[in-house]
Amino acid sequence: MPVESKKRITESKPIETVMFEHMHGNVLGSGQREPRISWVYRQELYEDKVAGAQIRIRRAKPGEETREEIIGVDYRGNHLHAWPVEPLESHERTSVAVRLVDDKGQASAWSDEVSLETGILEAGDRLGAMVGPGWYESTTDWRHAPLMRKEFELKAKPASARLYLTAYGLVEAEINGRKVGSDILTPGWTSYDDRLLYWTYDVTDYLQNKGNALGLWLGDGWYRGRLGFRGGKVNIYGDRLGAYAQLNVTYADGSEDVIVTNAYDKTWKAHKGPIVSSGLCEGEEYDARLEEQGWSEPGFDDANWEPVAELPLDVDKLTEPIAPAVREIDRHRPVSIQQHGAHAYLIDMGVNCTQRLRFKIHGFNVGQSFTVQHAEVLEDGELATAPLRRGHQIDRYTSNGEDTFWEPRFTIHGFRYALVEGWPSDLEPDDVVAIAYGSDLERTGWLETSDERVNQLHDNIVRSMNSNFVSIPTDCPQRDERLGWTGDIALFAPTAAMLFDVEGFLSSWLHDLNVETDKFGSVPYYVPYFPLGEWQTPKVQALAIWGDSAVLVPWAIYMDSGDKVMLGKQYNLVVKWIEEVSGYLSPDGVWDRRPGIVYGQLGDWLDPTAPPDDMAKALTAKELVATAYFARSARLASKMASDLGLVQYQDKYAELADHVKDGFISRFVGEDGLMTSDTQCAYALAIHFGLLDDHSDLKKFAGRRLAQLVRDRDYTVGTGFAGTPYILPALTETGHLEEAYRLFLSDKCPSWLYQVSMGATTTWERWDSMLPNGKVNSGVGMTSFNHYALGSVAEWMYSTLGGLVMSSPGWHRFKIAPKPWGPIKDAHVVHKTALGTIDLTWKYKADEGKLFIDAAIPEGSSALVEVGEYSDCIHAGMHHLVYEYKS
Ligand code: BGC
C-alpha cells in the first residue's frame, strides 16, 4: 500500500513488478523474440526528481557466458515497452530488472529480476517425431489409453534441462518416476489443424548422471475423444494418439544432448496402461491392476512393450503458448458425506465448479472397484444427472489391493455433488478432496460490499469464469458441450477482463477464431469449430452477437490493457466481420436477412419469457437485436481504427454505424419513442449502444419506458443473453438508479440474487435453472448451473456499485463515481491495471450526509472524482476525500 512520507530514490526499490508481454512471473518456452516489457511502480513520493528509468537485460544461450546491457528509457514508458535490444534467439534466456534514476544520475535499487526463455524457435531444431502406439485400435469410443517410455543415459547430471512437450490427444510426462510440472490437460485445445501448442518444463532437477527414464501418459482429450451434443463426434482431428517430446540437456561444460521421441531407433516403447478409457465428458476408468511399478524409471523391464509408430507431423505447426496452462487453482474439502445405501456415499463439496476428486484408497481388495458419479445439483435428494446429457461424468477405479491416492487424469468434471458407490469402508472426510482446475490466470479484480448476497454473487461470477476458462472460454463445464461459444464470451469479455488478466488467454483463442473464420467462411458459433448437429451448415452463417465476438472480444481486452499492438493484430478480423455483415443489410441498414440455420438469429437468447422448450422464441425481434449489435460493432470498429490511426476505416465505419443506427431508429423506434418490441432488451440496447444519442427526447422516453417495464415486472429481469449486460447500465445512464438497484437487489425469480437465494455457488445458464420449487428446469435438456454469460452484470457492479469507471483504454484515465443507494452504503473495489493497482473504498454515512472516499491511484493514470455536483481530478498517490452527499 502507498505511503505518504518522502523517500530518497537511492534508498528505495521503486518497482513493484516487472513482466513480459501479458505473462506474469518467469516465462519458459516463449515464442517472442522481442517480448515487450512492463513494470509497475510502487506508490511512493520521492525527495529527488525522477529523471528516467533503466532497464537491465542479461541474456545467455545455454552454455554461453551471460551478457549484460543497461538501457536508459523514459520512466513513463513503463507499459509494454518495446524490446530495446537485439531480438532473442532460440533457447535464449534473458532476465530483466528495472530501476529509477534521479536528475543527478543517482539510481535506486534494481527491481527483482524476471526471466524469460525462448522455446525451440527454429523449426529445424525441432528434432522429434510424433509417435504413438503401433497396435490396432478401434476408431470409436472407449479406447485403452497407452503409456510410452524410453530409457537413456546422461554423461553427467545436467546443468540445465528442458522438456518440450505436446501431443495428439493429451499428455503427462514423468521423469524417473516423478510427474513433470503441475499442468493438466496438456497441450490444451487449439484449432489443431492450424497449430499445436508445445509446453516447456524445467526438468534439470529430475535428471541424474547415467540412467534415466522418460515416461508419457496419453489420453484422448479434444483431439480424438467424443466432443459435443446430439451424440457428439469422435476423431475430430485424427484417430491416433501421439506425443512429441524433446529433452534438451546442457552440461556444465557447455556440451549438449538431445533426447527426442522417434520410432526409428526402437528405443521408445508403448504399452496399454491402467487407464482403460477416458473421455473429457464421460469420465475415466482406471484399473490399478494394470499398473507396472517403475515404468517411468530406469531399469524397468519393458521387454513385452511394443515399439512405437510414427505419425505425420508438420513441425511448423508447433507453437509456443501465450496463455497460462490449466492447473490447480483451488482445493475443497467435503462439507458433508452421507451414507446413501450400502457402500454408497453422497458427498457435498460445498461449491459447484470444475474440479476432480482425489481419493485416499485404502482397505480395498484386489479387483474391488468403486464408481463416482458427479452432478451439479440434487433433485429430491438424488444427483440430478439429466442436465449432463451424454456427459455422464462417471469415474471408476479398480484396486490392485494397495493403499494409494488416486485422481483421474484425462477427464474433468463440473460438479458440486458426487455419489461414490462401492467404497468398502466408511468414507471419511479425509479420504477425499476436490481439486479445482482452470487456466492459471492472474486475478485482477475484487469487489466487496456490506451486502453478503452481493458478495456471494460476485464470488459466483468469479467461480463460473474460472470453471469455464479452461484452455478456451467455454459455455459450461459439465454437460456434453463445453464448447467455445463465441456469443457467450462476446458478452462476458469486459467482465472477464475486470476479474483476471485475460489478454494472453483471449488473444490465443482469438487467433483460432481468426483461423476458423477464414476456413469456414464466417465467424463460427463456437471456436474451435467442427460441424455438429444443427450447427452443421455448408458454410458457417453469420450470427449477430456470436459473430460480433470478432469485435467485442478484442475491444474488451484492448480497453482494459490499452495494448494497441494486440488490437492491431486483431483488426483484420474486425474488418472481415464488418465487411461480411455489411453485405447482408437491407438498403435501410437493418440486418434482417435470416441466417440459414434452424433458429435463424439467436436474438435475446434465453429471454426468461421464452417458453423453456423453445429458447429461440424471445420477445424482442431478432432483427432488432442483430441490427443494434451490428451498429455497436461498426461504431467500435471505427473507434479502433481511430486509435490505430487507420483513417480510411475510421470514416468508413463511422458512416456505416450511422447508417445502421438510422435504419434501426426508423424501423424499430416509433415517433412517440415506443419501440416495435416493447421489451427490456430493446430499450437497453438502444440506450446503451448510443443509438438514440442524437435524439434526446427518444432517449429520455426509452429510459422512462425501460424503468416502467422493470417496475411492471415487479423488479424481475426480462432479458436473455443479449440484453442482460446492458439493462442496468441503460437504467443508470438514463437516471433510473432506483430501478437499477431494485432490480439488481431483487431476489424474485428471475433475477441475479434469486440464484443466490437458491444457494447457487455459480451463475446459471437460465435465470431459473433451478425452479423456485427446487426442481431442475428441464427445458429441452438444456440447463446448466455453470454458465458465465449472465454474470456479465459484474461490469455494472464495478462501475456503478463499486464506482470505478474506465474512461480510456488501459486505465490511463478513469472515473471514481460511487452511487450509494438503499442498503448499498459502502463498497471496496480493487483492480490491478497494467499501470498498477487501483484500490478504491467508499462509504456513505447518511446521518452525517457525507461520502468518504479512499483511493490509491497508480502512477501514469489520473481519476476524475464525480460525486453529486462535485468533480475533482486526482493523480497518482493515495487520496482521502470527503464530500457532502445526499442519497
Ligand atoms: C450454449 C450457449 C450457446 C448457445 C447458442 C448453448 O447450447 O450452452 O451458451 O451460446 O447454445 O445457441
Image: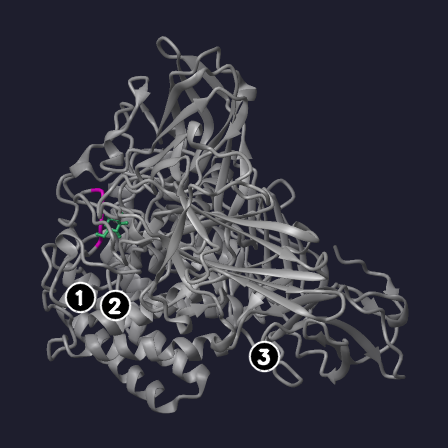
Q: Are marks 1 and 3 in contact (CB under 8 Å)?
A: no
- 1 or 3: mark nearer the eye: 3
Report whether 74 appears left or right of 221.
right
Please, which colouring scheme is shown?
one colour
Q: Which mark is residue 523?
A: 2
Disc 2 crowd rating (10 Å Cα; few below 14, some 14-19, many 20+) is many
**Callout 3 crowding tier (Cα within 10 Å): few <14, some 14–19, many ≥20:** some
Hey, which quadrant is residue 692 in on the image? bottom left
- Reading the chain from its start, which is encountered first: label 1 or label 3? 3
**Label pair 1/2, CB-CB below 8 angstroms:** yes
- In magenta stretch: residue 607: yes
Q: Earlier in the sequence, mark 3 or mark 2?
A: 3
Element carrying mark 3: loop
Horizontal side, residue 713 vs residue 757: left or right: left
Q: CA distance from mark 1 to mark 3?
A: 36 Å
Q: Amino acid at mark 3?
A: Glu
Q: CA distance from mark 3 to mark 2?
A: 30 Å
- Residue 783 seen: yes
Looking at the rendered structure, the kind of residue marked 1 is: Val
Q: Which mark is residue 540?
A: 1
Magenta region: 604-608
Q: Which residue is mark 3?
A: 34
